[in-house]
Image: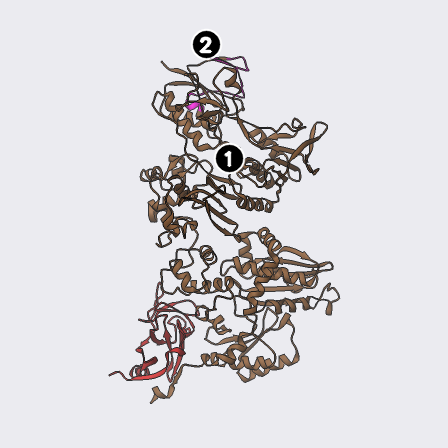
Chain colours: A brown, B red
Amino acid sequence: MTQKLIVIGAGMATGRMLEALVEADADYDITLINGEPRGNYNRIMLSPVLSGEKTFDEIVTHDDEWYKLHNVKTRFGCFVQNIDREKRTVTTDAGEALAYDKLVFGTGSNPFMIPLPGHDLEGVIAYRDLEDTQRMMDLGPDHKCVVIGGGLLGLEAAAGMAARGVDVTVVHIMGHLMERQLDEAAGYLLRKALVDKGIAVKCSANSKEILGEDGRVKALLLDDGTELPCDLLVMAVGIRPNVKLAQGCGLAVGKGIHVDDQMVTSDGDVLAVGECVEHDGAIFGLVAPLYDQAKVAAQTLMGEQTQFVQKKLSTKLKVTGCDLFSAGDFADGEGREDIVFRDPGRGVYRRLVIENNAIIGAVMYGDTADSNWFFGLIRDKTDITEMRDTLIFGPAYQGGTPLDPLAAVAALPRDAEICGCNGICKGQIEDAIAAGATDLGTVRLTTKASGSCGTCTGLVEQVLAVTLGDEFVMPAAAAICGCTDMTHEDVRRMIKSQRLTSMPAVWQECGWKTSCGCHVCRPALNFYLLADWPLEYQDDPQSRFINERKHANIQKDGTFSVVPRMWGGITTPDELRAIADAADKYMVPTVKVTGGQRIDLLGVKGEDLPNIWADLNAAGMVSGHAYSKGLRTVKTCVGTDHCRFGTQDSTGLGIKLEKELWGSWTPHKLKLGVSGCPRNCAEATCKDIGVICVDSGYQVSIGGAAGMDVRETELMVQVATEDEAIDVIKAVTQLYRENAKYLDRIYKWMGKVGLDWIKERVEAEGPALVDRFELSQSIYRRDPWAEHAQTKADRYQPLANLSLEAAE
Amino acid sequence: MTDWIDIAPLENVPKRGARMVKTAFGCVAVFRTGEDEVFALDNACPHKAGPLAEGIVHGKSVTCPLHNWVISLETGQAQGADEGRVATYPACVENGRILLDRAFLKARVAA
């Protein structure tokens, strides 16, 4: 006879259990009771709903149709009043009495509310369900919100509301954010990322009292007297298993409802799953064990033998826009060693805690791509002695084999867990692919892998790529060229972290597939090396494009163009005479005024270059670097010298800037402009770096373009003095040199890292950036024309002249 | 029998570089690879006659400075999707000096 099953609570655990029962066609007449006026949805995804990335409909896991289709009776918006275990009935608050043969508790957890004075004011909420989410969404931009609690939930709430334009302050009692999952350094990076999003963060902050007005929350008062005004106060300080109902009906309860390995409570006909249970002394908050419990409960209900086993857990977390991972134990301790990798430029931090030659803990921030591999090493207590040197770089860097980004995934065993939320292993995904799944969507549909929090999406794609080979097209980052599988970013990271200071070192350590690179990678490597190691690395002319090797622009007929520098676009009659003489002497066919306010001599023969340079040098002129991925020109207007509108000496500043920056190599060409007033006659706002002079100082903006793309600069900072303007420009130039991909103009680089990041770096380490720029300029701020004319002139002549020889 | 002409010391051409040799009938580019092998080719890309001696030398290839055609130094053949061939001439290094073949340079005249 069909038995009656009543399920209390429509959460993620009971949802999964219902699925398992329905799938197996279990012989039950099911009734689902839920306090929230709706069915099962993916609670983890409330954060994307809050931030506006998803709608609620998208996170519903079971809709009315599903319940109808599978004959699940529902009582939503309905609370259980009483349970009579003798008679086996459940009475709802609507007065309905329902009989059961089996009862399942899925009552979840309650948010913990700190009993501060004022915690019962209107506008003080938790972050638990859709109602709370809706309250936050309704707040609207330009309102203030305080979140108490710097754990995952609190930060999700904060990030979501900040994305909606709310002015958010997070108050956290501990010294750094997410102290249970992250160490101090990772907590610091996380904090920085949140501050970048406009969220104020207060750590080591004790809340004292919630202040109200007319029964509504008005502000949060801290111990130190600080008052944080707010229109809404979200308390996200933790959750407690919801055991009230279970306690009321006399079930054994500790921290949670006691269950055995079969998820059965102290009453043989009553089971419990999810956040409300206590199993072997532990309570549960992450989704993976809840799903395991759901499966076990379903099997128990169907009379199958099985047991729930607690597993070691890794936490891969996603605070909107920040990648975090932590696993195992990462506290400092005797006999424990750390391996740490930091890339401040990219905001990447990795730390491994080693004990007895095995990894016992890992914290990763910013780049968590290899986290599964590290987790496997922790779980299996793998001896890491052999790979210790390169361990921190992840699986792709082990064994000296080619750095195929897929090698790591290919090497994973079938039982390696890919999707932590759903407990899906690589083997199950492979099986699904063998059964016909060829894309992410199908894999997700058939295995649920990457269907919950989504952070393993990249891994699932890689398993697809490894299994299907060419049939699967990966949305992958492109390698530099055919000589390597590594991206520009990978190589820059290796150069910095491994202290690679020569081209052969890079070829060797990064597994170049060719003997000496090619015309694509060599110029990039040459730049990266000289930018990162100005003193150690010797510039290699043979790895430069001809224009930079011969300090002139090659033309289509093999002749060259010569552009002497005119500082800030200012010249003199003497200079003009010297240019005219040179044009006559070397029979220059074309003399043209350039867009960068100087004069171009086009059609000079290669052999004549050292001589024409020597002549121009003699008149006091130097190379204009019109050929370089480096500083080109600083275009100016006449400013206060002559112009009746000029507010500052724009010409003077332009000349100073050009004298400071000239000779420097950059990822791509670098053009500046300085306009003396907002009328902007120097067109500064479409340059890579532009300065607009105003009465009160200098507006420095970056990221303009007027080539294939046309873009206006974005304001980086306004400063009061010329010196500050020069320093800020040096700092941002150095930041660009140290971090951008070769051949990315500033606007492209800015598109990748964001103006906010650039601003923050320049503000945080401005003087250090200026120092590093100056160090590099101590080598490169010199005239290559003079050097070549004096010491390398013979290189410009034919190696031999056999004209007579061959004609004999 | 090969009739070699002594051109210049090897070190006058930079490693992974090239220099140009003038002849009465056009220019020949003399290349030196990272492994100190020497090759001689017409100094004109089959595409738009770009000066190959100004290109970046990698492995046993050179990339034309004008439009990045990659030319094999051994065969003169354009690599990849591009089609075309540059004339090649015998060249060798003896006692640290670069030698070119007089007969071939003369053949160039006849051609």
Residue identified by numbered label 1: A45
Q: Is residue A84 magenta?
A: yes
* Same chain letter for marks 1 and 2: yes
Q: Chain of mark 2?
A: A
- Relative image position of residue A421 (x, y in whole percent): 44, 35
**Left or right: residue A262 compared with residue A346:** left
Q: Quadrant of residue A721?
A: bottom right
Query: How many numbered discs sit on the rendered protein?
Result: 2
Decide if residue A602 is in sight here.
no
- Relative image position of residue A225 (x, y in whole percent): 71, 37
Q: Residue at x 62, y 54 (%)?
A: A763
Quarter placement of the C terminus of chain A? bottom left
**Amino acid residing under circle 1:** Met
* In front of the other: B86 or A640: A640
Per the image, label 2 sits on a secondary structure element best described as loop
Q: Chain of mark 1?
A: A
